[in-house]
Amino acid sequence: MKFKVACLQMNIAFGNPTVNYQSVESFIHEACQAQDPPDIIVLPEMWTTGYDLTNLNHLADKNGQLTIDFLKKIALKYQVHIVGGSVATQANEKMFNTMIVIDKEGNHVQNYSKLHLFKLMDEHLHLASGADKGMFTIDDETCAGVICYDIRFPEWIRGHVLEGAKAVFVVAEWPTPRLDHWRALLIARAIENQCYIIACNCVGSDPNNEFAGHSIIIDPWGKVLAEGGDEKEIIQAEIDLAEVDKIRDIIPVFSDRRPEYY
Ligand SMILES: O=C(O)CCC(=O)C(=O)O
């Protein structure tokens, strides 16, 4: 199956969900008014608040409900699937960094709370780690979602691919000083797993970080299909999941695995 995917590389207003909901609504409107509108829209990590971690007590979205309702309305209006980045959520007195996926019929498909918390940005001091995999289906195709630092754990993403994911969606607030890691890790994840990688980062800065942009869509051969710069923009490409099987026939990495030795 083919999908047109679009990453909305936004500049997140630090600690200001109201502004961010408005920006996302108008950004999605812009993407969907284009001549060639996307089938799937991807947002970045923590897009309602940014890394305003010390204020999560009043900023986090209770059970993600505000964001779920907001994205459902937009998905239905534009008939578009939304891999809704991630947002700070609160559940049972704990805070999480949670990806929300909504399909184009407005169904809430999946939540995934970030498993690997990033100590360099103090996530472990404010957030709890998730405990589930971010597997979901879009139009019956198996996909996976991971969040930012997760891409440094190849065994995590390999697990998703072994469970059938042909497209891995990555949402991030990846800082500029490690832009070269971002690109190298994502291209490696695509090549080693022979899958599509659709990675949405943000731009701009907060009091502690500058964010790298360079959202990127990579095919299962490791070829970059689209890549952003360091400004607010929409990047878009068509992915054809049949390509995954073709590449796996040429270099049969999955049937050549020797898991009994790993
Ligand atoms: O791994 C990195 O260098 C960046 C990770 C990160 O920014 C995050 O997980 O939020």
Image (tube, helix red, strand yellow):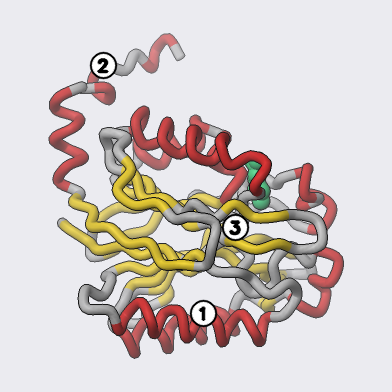
Please name the amino acid that badge 2 sits on.
Asp
Please name the amino acid that badge 1 sits on.
Val
Tell me the distance, in whole angstroms, between the alpha carbons under discs 2 and 3: 32 Å
Residue 258 is situated, as x and y percent measured from the top left of the image, at: 34, 13
Q: Mark 2: few, some, or many residues within 10 Å (few <14, many ≥20)?
A: few
129 in relation to 64, above or below: above
Residue 249 is situated, as x and y percent measured from the top left of the image, at: 14, 27
In-image side of 184 versus 176 (left or right): left
Observer-nearest residue: 49 or 95?
Answer: 49
What residue appears at the point 64 percent right and 74 percent down from the top-left corner? Answer: 48
In-image side of 95 versus 167 (left or right): right
Q: Earlier in the sequence, mark 3 or mark 1?
A: 1
- Per the rendering, the mark at residue 147 is none
CB contact under 8 Å: marks 1 and 2 = no
- Per the rendering, the mark at residue 24 is 1
Q: Mark 1: few, some, or many residues within 10 Å (few <14, many ≥20)?
A: many
CB contact under 8 Å: marks 2 and 3 = no
What residue appears at the point 36 percent right and 39 percent down from the top-left corner? Answer: 161
How many marks are shown on the rendered structure? 3
Observer-nearest residue: 116 or 19?
Answer: 19
In-image side of 34 versus 172 (left or right): left
What residue is shown with label 3?
113
Please name the amino acid that badge 3 sits on.
Ser
Tell me the distance, in whole angstroms, between the alpha carbons under discs 1 and 2: 43 Å
- Per the rendering, the mark at residue 256 is 2
